[in-house]
Image (tube, rainbow, N blue to C red):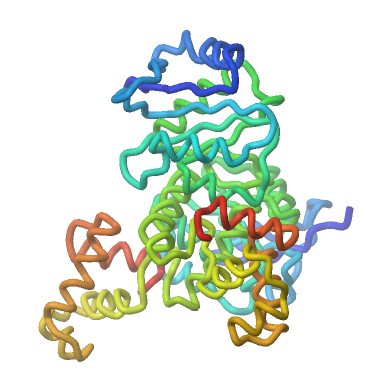
Amino acid sequence: MDPVRVGVRAVDSITEVGLVSFLRNCRQVEVVGTDELTERDVLVVQAERMTPQVIAELRTARWAGVPKVLLIDELRDSDVVSAVECGVVVVLPRSRTSGDGLVEAVVAAASGRGLLPPDLLGGLLDSIRRLQHDVLTPRGLGAAGLTAREVDVLKLMAEGLDTAEISSRLCYSERTVKNVIYEMTSRLNLRNRPHAVAYAVQAGVI
Amino acid sequence: MDVKVLVHAADEIGEAGVKAMLTGHEQLHVVPDEPGCRPDVLVVAVDGVVGTSTFALLRRSGAGESRGGPRAVLVADRFKSEDLLLAVECGVAALLSRQELKEGTLASAVVAVSRGAALMPYRLQGILLDQISRLRSQVLAPAGLTLSGIETRERDVLQLIAEGYQTDEIAVRLACSVGTVKNVLYGLMDRLQLNSRSHAVAYAMRAGVI
């Protein structure tokens, strides 16, 4: 397996140099400059707490799509949503994290896994549930968060209309209808149109 | 702290198995399924794949009510990743694989869930985080919403509160009535259970909204 390319950002230079020199000695990872990172790589961000500066750092456009490992001293429940919003997929409490644990986390992040401490995952799920109940459902967006346009298309698909018929009913181009369906199915890991319709019925949207 | 557990399984043998795994743990009390039993945690053991009937059961049990409903521990052979957000909505806080379930795992998962934690395989955590980030960028952001559930207009009000403005000053700045400012603010505070303006400002700043 190719080593995972990883970039490092830390609050102070001693920590940053320390992390880099540690990761340089590991065969599973290869340290690269943070400007070279792509979506297949991983960014390790170290911080003491989630300050607005740290959030801004995580939000930096240059590494928007890069999965992030957050090595942090103290993280409150309320911070976990903003961390996830910034693309953090792994949270490591600094005091309980060994060097090997860090490398494992980087490899996990590169392979599309997520690793949140159970209490934070619980907090995250509560926030998502509140979002679903208080924001998405009242707006008819469903638990999964479907856009109004997606719901319109799904309703017509459920009535047996094909792409051409849907496009003329909704006054969209066929390309737009296809794009709407493609975006929805890829976001929700759905395989095809019937799968999407079944999902929407189950979610109570149509 | 005592934890009341309600068990649902596909058949009697499964139910007996789950109950046997939970008894002997001093904090856990399995309660009978009758109206008014108000369990803290629901354990649902599914044969095969989690599907529509499981979600219907969870909804009927009141799991997933945003406040006060029981949280669910789901034990299943297989779980479809596309059902993750539905499962979250239905109050699922732990997903355990039936095959990998060991003596003691279930009881400790129930205790963890009763304390507000959640447990999920790392692969599913990754998929969930990906779904959440796409939900944010494709659904919430175009509608002027954020993951923390704060709307653009609420953010404008919070921004001005954070700069020290009073309600009447905010109304002038945003060209709306004092009543509107209050409605926006109280709507938000009520929804997110925030006690005061300071609490709301701190919440919004920590969530990175302002």
Identify whether B45 is placed above or below B50: above
Q: Please state which of residues B10 and B91 is positioned toward the viewer in this rendering.
A: B10
Q: Which quadrant does the C terminus of chain B fall into?
A: bottom left
Q: Residue at x 58, y 57 (%)?
A: A200
Q: Residue at x 64, y 31 (%)?
A: B76
Identify whether A20 is placed above or below B177: above
The x and y percentages for residue A162 are: 72, 73
The x and y percentages for residue B122 are: 65, 44
The x and y percentages for residue B84 are: 59, 48
> Does residue A58 appear left or right of residue A114 in this picture?
left
Identify whether A21 is placed above or below B185: above
The x and y percentages for residue A70 are: 56, 56
Q: Please state which of residues B143 and B165 is positioned toward the viewer in this rendering.
A: B143
Residue B15 position by quadrant: top right
Number of marks in the image? 0
Q: Residue at x 34, y 68 (%)?
A: B205
